[in-house]
Image (cartoon, rainbow, N blue to C red):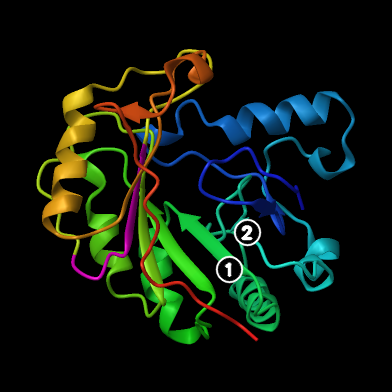
Amino acid sequence: MALNSSIEWTDATWNPVTGCSKISPGCKHCYADRMANRLHAMGQPRYRNGFQLTLQADIITRPLSWREPHHIFVNSMSDLFHDNIPYEYINQVFDIMSQAHWHTFQVLTKRSKRLAEISHKLKWPKNVWMGVSVENADYKFRISHLQQVPAAVRFLSIEPLLSSIGRLNLNKIDWVIVGGESGPKARPMKEDWVREVRDHCIKQETPFFFKQWGGVQKKKTGRLLDGITWDEMPSIELVFV
């Protein structure tokens, strides 16, 4: 688990799986792919397989030992609903998240079809937030899959935003994150695309979080949209005893 995550909308990361495969345009310049291969070259044992899908079963219980409550991004280096991850393993991850009830777990997938197919077989504790990635209008179907899932909080990660999303139906969506692509060969993001999403959120009263403009030097491009830092979070704040 990584403490003090540099990802703006979470506190920490937990990777019971590493590695993935690319399935849509948002994956083209995947940061996890770059990082995994860098760590492989450095001899980091967890990345002995580079970016090939690898179950890290020995750390599946790690959140149970972290007693201070955190928002935890699950599988920042993979996708929990990848077709090659056995259902039994996904179920184990959900069981650990349920046991670690003092944390809030944020799960994000591009495999929304599999998510919808197996969601009814999983137990959904209130501390699990479920999200899907949507990089352009062609992938808005992932939103309809997410809307079928009985998660306490459902969110969209519209990152990297690669073109206008168009009309958004945010029914049953509790949070929207938008960000531009960062790193080498980052594809540009237009301000009007971001404003379009923000305006849908305002109209439909959905919390809006603007993560970054991105680019090769994302710290320089910053996070301001029309002079404002948009740090809205889901209105459902869960308290566990």
The residue singled out by tag 1 in the image is 104
Residue 178 placed where, x, y %?
Answer: 34, 40
**Is 50 on the left or on the right of 135, as rendered?**
right
Report helix, strand or loop for mark 2: strand
Report helix, strand or loop for mark 1: strand
Q: Nearer the viewer, residue 202 or 163?
A: 202
Image point (29%, 75%), residue name: 148
The residue singled out by tag 2 in the image is 72
**Is 12 on the left or on the right of 191, as rendered?**
right
Q: Quadrant of residue 162?
A: top left
Q: Is residue 81 visible in this depiction of the protein?
A: no
Amino acid beneath label 2: Ile
Image point (50%, 76%), residue name: 238
Q: Nearer the viewer, residue 218 or 226?
A: 226
Please, which residue is most extreme toward the front here? 227
| Magenta range | 171-178
Q: Is residue 128 shown above or below 2? A: below
Q: CA distance from mark 1 to mark 2?
A: 6 Å
**Is 202 on the left or on the right of 32, as rendered?**
left
Q: Is residue 176 magenta?
A: yes
Q: Is residue 228 magenta?
A: no
- Could you classify mark 1 by the number of other residues whose Cα lies within 10 Å: few (under 14), some (14-19), or many (20 or more)? many
Amino acid beneath label 1: Thr
* Circles 1 and 2 in contact, beta carbons < 8 Å: yes
Image point (45%, 28%), residue name: 28
